[in-house]
Amino acid sequence: MLSKLLNDGAGGKPTAGQLLAVAAGVGVATALGYGVYRLLQYRAAQQPPSEWHRVGEVSDLWIYPIKSCGAVRVRQFQCSPIGPQVGFLRDRIFMVVKSADGKFITGRSHPTLVLVQPAFDAQYERMTLSAPGMMDIGVDVRKLLESSAPGSAEVWDQPVTAVDCGEEVARWLSRFLLSEDFGLRLVYYPLDRPTRPVREKNRIHRLLTARDSGALHDATSYMLVSEGSVADVNTRLDKPVPALQYRANILVKGPSAFEEDDWRWIRIGDTVYRNVKPCTRCLFTNVDPETGVSSPEQEPLNTLRKYRLKPGLGQSPVVGMQMGIRTLGAIGLGDAVYVG
């Protein structure tokens, strides 16, 4: 066919138009072939491996029910589409917002948020909040779901469904964080599925999808870091920081420092995760979870910027990885961690 087309011009020579047509056809075929190749590559990247090797074990588990507030240490949790959970104790399912516009606040601008410590009853239905200088206050999560009509709030300029938690806890938070009787509200995410698209800044991570966005999380519903990585950073600091300061859900014992950077798939029990992006670090990493004070020396962030920057991620250094859940299940302390 190609030979006939090239010989059909005057005197058996191809015309300029024929040459252009052939070139265009070759270009289209090449583009289509490359497109198919990329599609096959992407599909292959979505398939869990058939072989796994053990790298360590789970040494700690944390759930952060209120975005930017204190952690609840647990022995095990269920892995749901929107993040870790034990009953109504769920990860980043509450957040503090401004009364005026419904936009969330975080420990970046309000570091004393980390001193708001949640605790749950034995049935994991009622949350109690404590903070220095404040009387404890309770929030009945089950009643919130039964009696309140959903409204809306914003996470990184993205609208989310949210249930307001009432005047009493709003006043409590405003007094502790602002020394005022008003200004802040506590809201709750009532859905069992993610609803936000991938943020514009994160679209460079091609494996990250909207199903990974979690409840009220910044990027993904699961985050893992290794003890080795935490220890490596601490060897470079005058004042070591605890693993909790990195606000991961899963701490792993066994791997060498930053080995998790290169993991693709992770299996713990029956649960399977995909490494969808590195966990980039911001000013919140400098906040001591025990004191609620941000490091005057900007540590560990300054030290991390000396050796943990990655191409395409600007001045945000990397510690740990953010994961998307691919097979639901439960995990617990001491469980073996496999990668593939």
Image (tube, grey):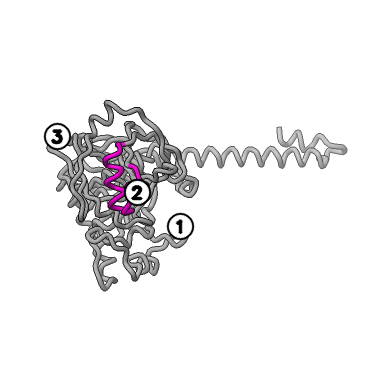
Specify the quadrant that holds the N terminus: top right
73 up-or-down from 301: above or below: above
Counting residues from the start of the chain, the first of labels 3 and 1 encountered is 3
Circle 2 — which element? strand
Q: Which of the numbered marks, if any, corresponds to residue 322? A: 2
Q: Which disc number belongs to residue 123? A: 3
In what element is the residue under mark 1? Answer: loop
Distance CA(mark 3)–CA(mark 2): 29 Å
Residue placed under numbered mark 1 in the picture: 313
Disc 3 residue type (three-letter): Gln
Q: Nearer the viewer, residue 337 or 85?
A: 85
Q: Would you say residue 281 sits in the magenta stretch?
A: no
- Looking at the image, is mark 2 or mark 1 earlier in the sequence? 1
Query: What number of labels is visible?
Result: 3
* Residue 98 in view (yes/no): yes
Q: Is mark 3 on a helix, strand or loop?
A: loop
Quarter occupied by residue 220: top left
Disc 1 crowd rating (10 Å Cα; few below 14, some 14-19, many 20+) is some
Coordinates of residue 48 in the picture (x, y in percent): 33, 39
Disc 2: CA contacts within 10 A as few (<14), some (14-19) or many (>=20): many
Q: Give the range drawn in magenta.
A: 165-185
Front residue of this view, candidates 225 and 66: 66
Outermost residue on the top side: it is 146
Q: Where does the image place residue 176, in percent across and percent down from the top left? A: 28, 52
Residue 205 badge: none
Q: Residue at x 22, y 49 (%)?
A: 117
